[in-house]
Amino acid sequence: MALDFLVELLISALIVVGGVFSLVGSFGLAKLPDLMTRLHGPTKSATLGVGAVLIASMLFAAWYEGHLSLHELLITLFLFLTAPITANFIAKAFLHGHADQKRRLPPTGSDYGWASFDAPPESGDEEPNSMAGPRRGGN
Amino acid sequence: MITYALFFGFACLAVALLLNLYRLARGPSIADRVLALDTMVVNGIGLLALYGMATDAEVYFEAALLFAMVGFISTVAYCKFILRGDIIE
C-alpha cells in the first residue's frame, strides 16, 4: 500500500535526520574551541535532532498502534522551551568565572558597560531587577 | 526500513554520547562539564525514544519525560550554584 510506504519513509527519514543532527551537535560540543561557541552545538542542533526523533516516535505510535499519544509532543515542547534557558544559565555561569573576558569587549559608546558584566544604570523610576541587579554578597 | 533507520539512529546517538563523555572528562571549565551533562540528558532522551520505538513499549516515553524534567532542573540548579554559591536563597 502506497500510503503505508510513505508513512514508513517519513518515519525513517525523521529518525535519520534526528540521529544526524544529534551527532552533529555533539561533535560541535567536542570540537569547537571555547565554551561560548560550544554552546551552539547542543542548544540548537541536538535539540532539533531529539525533536525530530520524538516526532518520529509520535508518528510511529499513531500509525502502527492506532492511538495518537501526545507525550512525545509534550517532551519536544518542553525541550524546545528549556534549551534557551539552560544555554543562558550556562553562559552566565561561564561569564561569572571569566570576568577577564570584559577586557576583550568593544566600548559600548555610553557611560555604562555591557549588561553581562556591569550593573544597570540607576534610573530612579523603575525598580532594579534582582536577576540583573548588582550582586549581593554571597551567603 | 524503519529497523535500519533505528539502527542508524542508535549508532549516531551512541557516538554522540561518547563525544559528550569526552567533553565531560576533558572540559576545561566547570560550565563545559555542565553543558556536556545537559547534552547527555538530551541525547539520552533521544535514545529512550528510539528504544521505545524498537520495543513497542509505552514506559520509555514516561521515562523520557521524567528525564527531560530532571535534566532541566539539575542544569539550572548547578548553574545557580556556580553563580550564587547557593541553590535556594
Image (cartoon, coloured by chain):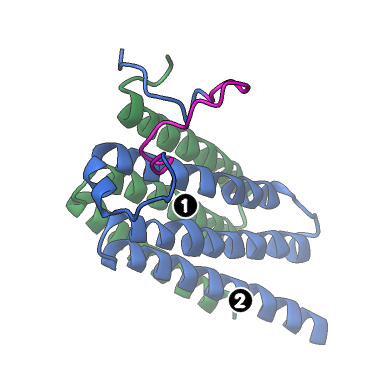
Chain colours: A blue, B green
> Is B37 on the left or on the right of A73, as rendered?
left
Magenta stretch in the rendered image: A112-129
Name the residue located 69 percent from the left edge and 64 percent from the top edge. A60
Q: Residue at x 30, y 44 (%)?
A: B31
Image height of A56 relative to B36, above or below: below
Chain identifier of the residue bearing label 1 in the image:
B
Residue wearing tag 2:
A12
Foreground pick, A128 / A37: A128
Q: Which mark is residue B80?
A: none
Principal secondary structure, stretch drawn in magenta? loop
Residue at the location (34% across, 19% down)? B86
**Disc 2 on helix, strand or loop?**
helix
Residue B43 versus residue A89 in the image, above or below: below
Q: In this rendering, does residue A121 appear at all? A: yes
Dot 2 crowding, Cα within 10 Å, few <14, some 14–19, many 20+: many
The quadrant holding residue A54 is: bottom right
Taking the magenta stretch, the answer to whether it contains residue B16 is no
Q: Quadrant of the C terminus of chain A?
A: top left
Say whether residue A37 is left or right of residue A10.
left
Q: Position of residue B73 (x, y in %)?
A: 48, 33
Q: Are marks 1 and 2 in contact (CB under 8 Å)?
A: no
Q: Is residue B54 visible?
A: no
What's under tag 2, amino acid-wise? Ser
In the structure shown, which secondary structural element does the residue marked by tag 1 occupy? helix
Q: Residue A74 appears at what percent x and percent y?
A: 68, 46
- Which callout, 1 or 2, points to the residue nearer the camera? 1
Q: Amino acid at mark 1?
A: Val
Q: Chain of mark 2?
A: A
Mark-to-mark CA distance, 1 and 2: 20 Å
Q: Residue at x 58, y 42 (%)?
A: B65
- Which residue lies under the disc numbered 1? B42
